[in-house]
Amino acid sequence: MDYSDNYAYDYNYSYDENATVTEESVFQHTSTCLKEILCMSLLVVSVVIFLLGFCGNALVIWISGFKMKKTINTTWYLSLAISDFVFCAFLPFSIANMAMEDWVFGRFMCKFAPSVMFLNMFSSIFLLVIISVDRFVSVAFPVWAQNHRTIRKASVIVVLAWLMAIALSVPSAVFRDVGSHLGRTICFNNYTSSQHSHKIVALSRLLAGFIAPFVIIIICYSIIILKLRTNRMTKSSKPFKVMTALIAAFFVCWLPYHVFVLLELSHQNYSHSVLSAGLKVGTSLAAANSVLNPVLYVFMGNDFKRKFKSSVLSKMENAMADEGRTTSRYLSRSSSVDTRASTHI
């Protein structure tokens, strides 16, 4: 049976007719989530990720979609924020399932909700790759980029990335199923229809969702750093620190998940408790990437920060207008900062 590929959902094996598994050795549930330290900790972490990710990405969508002039960079940021926002919006399903240890949302949501989770995984990663390539092109080929980078082309690229993400998310809906076990309803991965389907799905996700994107990101940012240092195009060390943070965040968030997914393919050689705990921690780290994305890719952009301060202070000015003209004048001056700086790191 298989307990991977659930992305913060139920960790359980898919039914395997050839496997000899006893309920006492694998499926015995002696305690609830609220009594287990690891499960309770991950539950709290998931709630925090939901709150921060939902609010943070909603703020990014509001500012980049409605408060800022539409540019190529805001197109990337807006698409990334929408992807992470949708993921966070569906987190309550996995949080409820984790807390109750019972799937109560029916077969359709069992198939649909995890598919949305994987849609976020692929679309988010593809968008990070697009941003990396776009920055590489802008630095390595500035003249060409100036003449060929357009908002229309950026929108087309985003649509293509989403279509690829949808295609790679289909297996999650195909192999998801609902069953009953030990008096509870579980939403699990049923790979019994094809002998090698589990391995194919896991390896394709590893290749398309981690190895290939990570290699591309590493290459792009390595060339950017070398180019900037060689040409002395920047006097500040901030771009290098931010680029290092981007690569490190991507690696740390996604590596544990994919490692344990690979180990799960040979689950008979490893302890069930170790694999289960590893997958739970791995999926929580992967989910945390939806919180880090708006911080690393957006809030560190100078014009976004200025627009954020301008918008928030303007709202405060309107709300406090009746409190006194002095405060109103101060907020008005504070909200008039120049918002024309580039969003490039």
Image (spheres, rainbow, N blue to C red):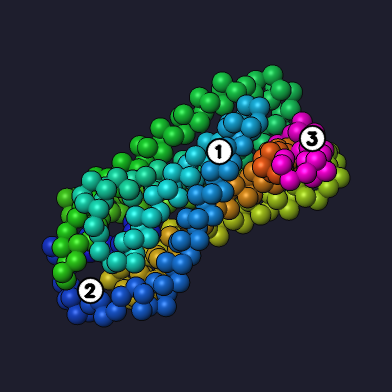
Q: Amino acid at mark 2?
A: Phe
Q: Which mark is residue 97?
A: none
Left or right of 226: which side holds 98? Answer: left
Tell me which corner region of the image, top left, top right, bottom left or bottom right, holds residue 233: top right
Tell me which corner region of the image, top left, top right, bottom left or bottom right, holds residue 261: bottom left
Q: Nearer the viewer, residue 160 or 186?
A: 186
Residue located beneath label 1 in the image: 61
User: What residue sits 22% from the left and 61% below the top?
Assistant: 186
| 1 and 3 marks in contact (CB < 8 Å) | no
Q: CA distance from mark 3 to mark 2?
A: 61 Å
User: What residue sits 41% from the left and 72% below the top?
Assistant: 40
In front of the other: label 2 or label 1? 1
Q: CA distance from mark 1 to mark 3?
A: 22 Å
Which sits earlier in the primary sequence, circle 1 or circle 3?
Answer: 1
Q: Which residues are magenta?
A: 321-345
Q: Amino acid at mark 3?
A: Ser
Q: Position of residue 5 (x, y in %)?
A: 34, 56
Residue located beneath label 3 in the image: 336
Q: Position of residue 127 (x, y in %)?
A: 53, 39
Q: Position of residue 217 (x, y in %)?
A: 59, 45
Residue located beneath label 2 in the image: 27
For this orientation, the residue located farthest to the left is 17
In front of the other: label 1 or label 3? 3
**Badge 1: few (under 14), some or many (20 or more) residues near its Cα, within 10 Å?**
many
Q: Position of residue 298 (x, y in %)?
A: 64, 43
- Asked if the magenta segment contains residue 339, the reply would be yes
Tell me which corner region of the image, top left, top right, bottom left or bottom right, holds residue 342: top right
The answer to whether residue 18 is visible is: yes
